[in-house]
C-alpha cells in the first residue's frame, strides 16, 4: 500500500469539484423516502402512549377497524414473540432484537411518552388519524423514572424485571435494578492521587438532546406475492435495516430488499428501525404498498435522542500541570432499553491526554425516556465538556496557560489509552501548536464582557466492512456503486478516490448507492467511516480494475503482462515506449478483448485513524440577560488528508453548530409525569444561522498510515469541544463556572446573581 | 510469549493483574489457555464460536476483525476491548 506521506502530487484529491447531488437537492428533484408513491398505496399512522410508564392492560381496535377506509390495525401482540437475542451487524453494533422490536411497538408496557402502542392503516392519512382516536387503550399508570439519580436508588420503580445489560459497544453487567455498569482501568489511580500535588474534583450534568435531522423518518414497504419485502427508507445503513427487519419479522434475509433514499440528516439517529416493521406487517396483511411517515413530534417523542449525563471527574496533577491520574464516574441515560452510548463516552473520555493511572466507572441507566441513540461521536460531548472544563480549572488554579497544560499532557503516538492499547500515529501536539500560532489565539478580545475558551477532543470512529463495485464502460466512463449511504457528499469523495487511482477526471465517474440486492454487504454510514473505509474498498476495486485492464492491454500488444505498466492515467508498453493507451482508449478496446469489466471489493479495515480537534472561541456576555454572544470561532482538525477540503470544512462547521446548540439552548424538557413538553422545533431550540458566527476552519494533515491517501475519519469529533470551549470562555469573561448544560441565558443569569450574592 | 491485557472488569479472574503472559498461535488457543490458568475467564471472552458480543480483539495495537480466528506472531500484545463505532 502506498502511503500518503511523500505522495504530494495528487491530481484529483485535494480539489473541490461540485457535488453531484447539489442541483438535484436545491431544485427539489432529489428523491427522499417520502417521495415514493406506489399504485394502490395505503397510509399508516401510529398511536403513541400518552404515559411515560404504564402497563398496557388491553387494546381495543374494533371501532377503528369499523371506520370506512381503514384496512387494518396492529398492536404489539400481532408481531412475533421474540426471545432476547443479541445480533451484531457485521461484527459490531450489537443490539438486542427483542428490545428493538418492543421499542417499535410496545407489548406489555409503555416505557416512555411517545412509545408506539398501536397502529392503523387506511386509504389516506386523514382517515388513519381519525381511526387512531377510536382505539381504546386500557393503561395502568405507573410512576415514571426521569432522572439518573432517581433511577439508581434502591427503591426506584423498575422498568424491566429482567434485562440484558450492555448493547452499544461494551458489555456491561447488571448493577442496579435500572442500570448496567462497567469499569475501565489503566494502572493504579489510587497511587496517582496519593502522589499528586493537586487533586481536583467536580461534577457536571448535561441534558438529553436530539440529533435534529431535518427529515423525519419515512418508509414505504411493498410485499410481493413471492414474499419479497421491498423497503424504501431514509437510513444510514440499509443492510442494518434489512437485518433488523428480517429478525423482527422472522423473514429470510434474501427476501428483504432495502433501498436507501436520499437522506435529510442522520447523525447516528437513523440506523435502526422504528416504523419499518409496522409498515411491513401492514403491507403483508393487506397485500398493498404501505407508507408511514413520522411527524416532527413523532420524531422527537418516538425516536432515539442522545442521552443526558451526570459526570464526576477527579484529577491528580503535579505542580507543573502534568496529569498523574484520573478517576471518572459516568452515568448516562440509556432510556427505555439498555445499551446507550456511555461506553463510547468512556473510551474517549481521557483519550488525547497521556494519563498513566486512570479508571472509569460507567453506568448505563434505564429511564422512562426514549431508547437513547448515538449522536456524532456518541456520548462524546458531555464527557468532553466535563474533562475540558477540568483542564481549564487546573490551568487557572496553577496559573498556567490552558493551552500549555494541554500541550504538556497531550497524548503522542505510542502512549497508552485507558484500554491499554498504544495510540496509533497522531499529531496532537502539532495540532495544539497550530492553535498557538494562529492569529485568533493572540488577537485582542473586544466587547463589554469578553472571554476566550479552548477545548480539545479525540474520537476514534469505525473501520468495519465496506463494499464497492466498478464497471469500465466502453466510452471510458466508469460506474461506481457503493454500499454506504451518502450522508455528507461521500459520493463525491469516493468518486475522487476512484478518479485519482484510475487517472481519469472525476467527471467521468458516476456513483450510485444501490439496494441491498445489488451490492455486497456494507456496514452503516456511521463512525466517520465512509470516506475512509468505503474509500479503501473503492481503492481496492480500482486497483483490481487496473489489473484486469492491464491483462487486456498485454493481450492487445501481444506482450507479457509484466511488460505493461500503468502510471499517470496511461497504460505503457515497456517493450515499446511509443505504445501507450489512456484509460479511455483502453476502455474503448475492452469489448474486442473479452467484453466489459466489472470488479467488486469488500474490505474490513482495522480502524479509521484517530480524529483530533481543538476549538477556540471568543464570546461576549450580556450580564443583564445572561446571553452568550459568540464573536469568533475557529475549529482546528487533523483530518489525515482532506479529499475534498470544502466538504471537510462543512463537516467541521456542522459539528460545531450542533455542539453549540447542545451547549447553549437544546434540551428535552419533561414535566413531572414524564411528558415531553417541547415537541416542535419552535420549542426545541436548535441554533439557526442567526445564532451562529462564521466558523473558521483550519485543516491539518497528519496522514493515516493505514489508508493509501492518508485519510482519517472526519465527521464526528467536531461536535465534542464546543460546550467545553464555551464554558471556559464564559469563565474567562465573567468568572462563573457552568457545570450544567445547556448554558441558557436564564442559567447564566442565575449563576451571575449567585456570584454577585457571594454564594 | 504473548502479553495479554485483561479488561478491568475481568481482572478479578487474574487476581488483579492487568497483564498476563500466555502462549498460543491464535486467539482461540490464547482464550483456551487463559481459561485453563484462570477458570471462568474464557467464557467471559468467548461465546460459542465467537468472541462475546460487544468484545473485540486488538493485536499489536490494531483491531483484528477475525476475532477468535485471528492468528498471532510470537510475542504479540493482545487487548480484549469493546468494539468501536460511532454516529
Image (cartoon, rainbow, N blue to C red):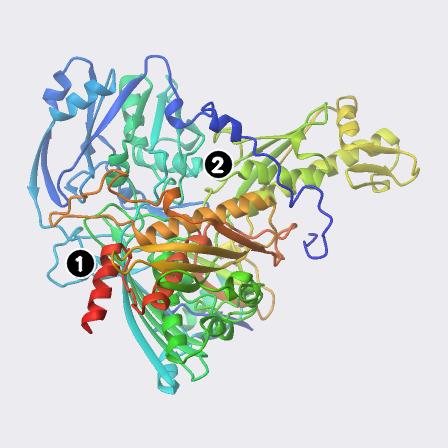
- Residue at the disc numbered 1: A151
- Same chain, marks 1 and 2? yes
Quarter where residue A574 is shown:
top right
Q: Chain for mark 2?
A: A
Q: Nearer the viewer, residue A57 or A47?
A: A47
Residue A202 point in image, percent of width and height: 29, 71
Q: Nearer the viewer, residue A171 or A728?
A: A728
Residue at screen point 33% across, 19% down: A289
Q: Chain for mark 1?
A: A
Q: Is residue A570 left or right of residue A423?
A: right
Looking at the image, is A723 positioned above or below residue A482? below
The reply to whether residue A10 is in sight is yes
Q: Is residue A182 left or right of residue A424?
A: left
Residue A412 point in image, percent of width and height: 55, 69
In which quadrant is the C terminus of chain A drawn? bottom left
The reply to whether residue A601 is in sight is no
Q: Secondary structure at mark 2?
A: loop
Residue A254 point in image, percent of width and height: 44, 30
Quarter where residue A747 is shown:
bottom left
Looking at the image, is A633 positioned above or below residue A37? below
Looking at the image, is A286 positioned above or below residue A254? above
Residue B84 point in image, percent of width and height: 44, 55
Instruction: Give me the disc on residue A485.
Output: 2
Instruction: Give me the disc on residue A6.
Output: none
Mark 1 / mark 2, whichever is N-terminal:
1
Q: Secondary structure at mark 1?
A: helix
Amino acid at each position: 500500500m502506498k502511503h500518503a506521506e511523500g505522495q504530494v502530487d495528487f491530481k484529483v484529491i485535494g480539489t473541490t469539484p461540485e457535488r453531484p447531488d447539489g442541483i438535484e437537492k436545491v431544485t427539489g428533484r432529489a428523491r427522499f423516502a417520502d417521495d415514493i408513491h406506489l399504485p394502490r398505496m395505503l397510509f399508516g399512522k401510529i398511536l403513541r402512549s400518552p404515559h411515560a410508564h404504564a402497563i398496557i392492560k388491553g387494546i381495543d381496535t374494533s371501532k377503528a377497524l369499523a371506520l370506512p377506509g381503514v384496512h387494518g390495525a396492529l398492536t404489539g401482540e400481532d408481531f412475533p414473540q421474540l426471545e432476547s437475542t443479541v445480533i451484531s451487524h457485521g461484527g459490531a453494533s450489537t443490539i438486542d432484537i427483542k428490545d428493538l422490536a418492543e421499542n417499535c411497538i410496545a407489548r406489555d408496557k409503555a416505557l416512555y411518552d411517545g412509545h408506539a402502542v398501536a397502529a392503523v392503516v387506511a386509504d389516506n392519512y386523514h382517515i388513519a388519524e381519525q381511526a387512531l382516536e377510536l382505539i381504546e387503550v386500557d393503561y395502568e399508570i405507573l410512576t415514571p423514572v426521569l432522572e439518573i439519580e432517581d433511577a439508581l436508588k434502591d427503591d426506584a420503580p423498575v422498568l424491566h424485571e429482567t434485562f440484558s445489560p450492555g448493547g452499544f459497544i461494551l458489555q456491561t453487567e447488571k448493577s442496579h435494578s435500572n442500570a448496567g455498569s462497567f469499569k475501565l482501568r489503566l494502572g493504579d489511580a489510587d497511587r496517582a492521587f496519593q502522589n499528586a500535588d493537586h487533586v481536583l474534583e467536580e461534577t457536571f450534568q448535561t441534558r438529553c438532546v436530539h440529533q435534529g435531522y431535518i427529515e423525519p423518518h419515512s418508509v414505504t414497504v411493498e410485499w410481493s406475492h413471492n414474499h419479497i419485502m421491498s423497503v424504501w427508507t431514509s437510513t444510514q445503513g440499509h443492510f442494518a435495516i434489512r437485518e433488523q427487519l428480517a429478525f423482527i419479522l422472522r423473514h429470510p434475509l434474501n427476501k428483504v430488499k432495502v433501498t436507501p433514499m436520499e437522506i435529510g440528516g442522520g447523525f447516528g439517529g437513523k440506523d435502526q428501525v422504528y416504523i419499518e416493521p409496522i409498515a411491513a406487517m401492514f403491507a403483508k396483511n393487506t397485500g398493498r404498498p404501505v407508507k408511514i411517515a413520522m411527524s416532527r413530534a413523532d420524531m422527537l417523542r418516538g425516536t432515539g435522542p442522545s442521552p443526558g449525563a451526570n459526570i464526576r471527574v477527579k484529577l491528580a496533577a503535579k505542580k507543573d500541570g502534568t496529569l498523574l491520574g484520573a478517576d471518572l464516574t459516568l452515568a448516562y441515560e440509556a432510556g427505555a432499553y439498555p445499551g446507550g452510548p456511555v461506553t463510547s463516552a468512556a473510551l474517549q473520555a481521557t483519550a488525547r491526554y497521556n494519563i498513566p493511572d486512570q479508571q472509569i466507572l460507567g453506568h448505563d441507566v434505564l429511564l422512562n425516556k426514549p431508547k437513547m441513540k448515538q449522536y456524532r461521536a456518541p456520548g462524546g460531548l458531555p464527557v468532553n465538556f466535563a474533562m475540558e472544563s477540568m483542564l481549564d480549572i487546573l490551568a487557572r488554579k496553577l496559573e498556567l496557560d490552558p493551552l500549555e497544560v494541554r500541550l504538556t499532557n497531550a497524548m503522542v503516538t505510542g502512549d497508552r489509552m485507558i484500554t491499554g492499547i498504544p495510540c496509533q500515529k497522531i499529531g496532537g501536539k502539532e495540532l495544539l501548536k497550530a492553535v498557538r500560532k494562529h492569529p485568533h489565539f493572540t488577537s485582542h478580545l473586544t466587547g463589554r464582557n469578553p472571554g476566550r475558551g479552548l477545548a480539545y477532543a479525540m474520537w476514534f470512529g469505525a473501520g468495519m466492512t465496506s463494499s464497492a463495485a466498478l464497471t469500465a464502460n466502453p466510452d471510458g466512463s466508469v460506474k461506481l456503486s457503493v454500499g454506504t449511504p451518502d450522508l455528507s457528499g461521500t459520493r463525491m469523495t469516493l468518486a475522487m478516490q476512484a478518479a485519482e487511482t484510475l487517472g481519469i477526471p472525476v467527471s467521468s465517474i458516476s456513483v450510485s448507492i444501490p439496494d441491498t440486492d445489488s451490492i455486497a454487504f456494507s456496514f452503516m454510514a456511521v463512525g466517520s467511516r465512509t470516506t475512509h473505509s468505503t474509500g479503501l474498498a473503492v481503492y481496492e476495486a480500482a486497483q483490481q480494475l487496473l489489473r484486469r485492464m492491464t491483462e487486456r492491454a498485454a493481450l492487445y500488444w501481444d506482450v507479457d503482462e509484466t511488460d505493461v505498466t500503468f502510471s499517470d492515467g496511461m497504460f505503457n508498453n515497456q517493450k515499446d515506449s511509443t505504445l501507450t493507451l489512456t484509460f479511455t482508449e483502453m476502455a474503448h478496446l475492452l469489448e474486442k478483448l473479452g467484453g466489459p469489466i466489472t470488479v467488486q471489493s469488500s474490505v474490513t479495515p482495522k480502524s479509521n485513524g484517530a480524529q483530533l480537534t481543538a476549538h477556540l472561541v471568543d464570546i461576549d456576555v450580556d450580564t443583564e440577560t445572561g446571553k452568550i454572544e459568540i464573536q469568533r470561532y475557529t475549529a482546528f482538525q487533523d483530518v489525515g488528508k482532506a479529499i475534498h477540503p470544502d466538504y471537510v470544512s462543512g463537516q467541521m462547521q456542522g459539528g460545531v453548530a450542533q455542539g453549540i446548540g447542545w451547549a447553549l439552548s437544546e434540551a428535552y424538557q419533561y414535566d413531572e409525569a414524564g411528558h415531553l413538553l417541547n415537541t416542535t422545533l419552535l420549542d426545541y431550540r436548535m441554533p439557526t444561522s442567526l445564532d451562529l458566527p462564521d466558523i473558521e476552519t483550519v485543516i491539518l494533515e497528519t496522514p493515516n498510515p493505514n489508508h493509501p491517501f492518508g485519510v482519517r475519519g472526519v465527521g464526528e469529533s467536531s461536535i465534542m469541544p464546543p460546550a467545553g470551549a464555551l464554558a471556559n470562555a464564559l469563565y474567562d469573561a465573567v468568572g462563573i463556572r457552568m457545570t450544567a448544560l445547556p448554558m441558557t441565558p436564564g442559567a447564566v443569569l442565575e449563576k451571575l446573581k449567585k456570584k454577585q450574592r457571594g454564594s | 510469549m504473548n502479553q495479554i491485557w485483561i479488561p478491568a472488569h475481568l481482572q478479578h479472574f487474574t487476581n488483579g493483574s492487568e497483564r498476563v503472559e500466555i502462549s498460543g498461535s491464535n486467539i482461540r488457543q490464547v482464550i483456551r489457555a487463559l481459561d485453563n490458568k484462570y477458570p471462568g475467564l474464557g467464557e467471559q471472552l468467548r461465546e460459542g464460536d465467537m468472541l462475546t458480543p460487544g468484545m473485540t480483539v486488538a493485536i499489536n495495537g490494531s483491531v483484528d476483525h477475525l476475532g477468535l480466528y485471528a492468528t498471532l506472531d510470537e510475542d504479540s500484545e493482545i487487548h480484549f476491548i469493546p468494539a468501536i463505532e460511532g454516529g
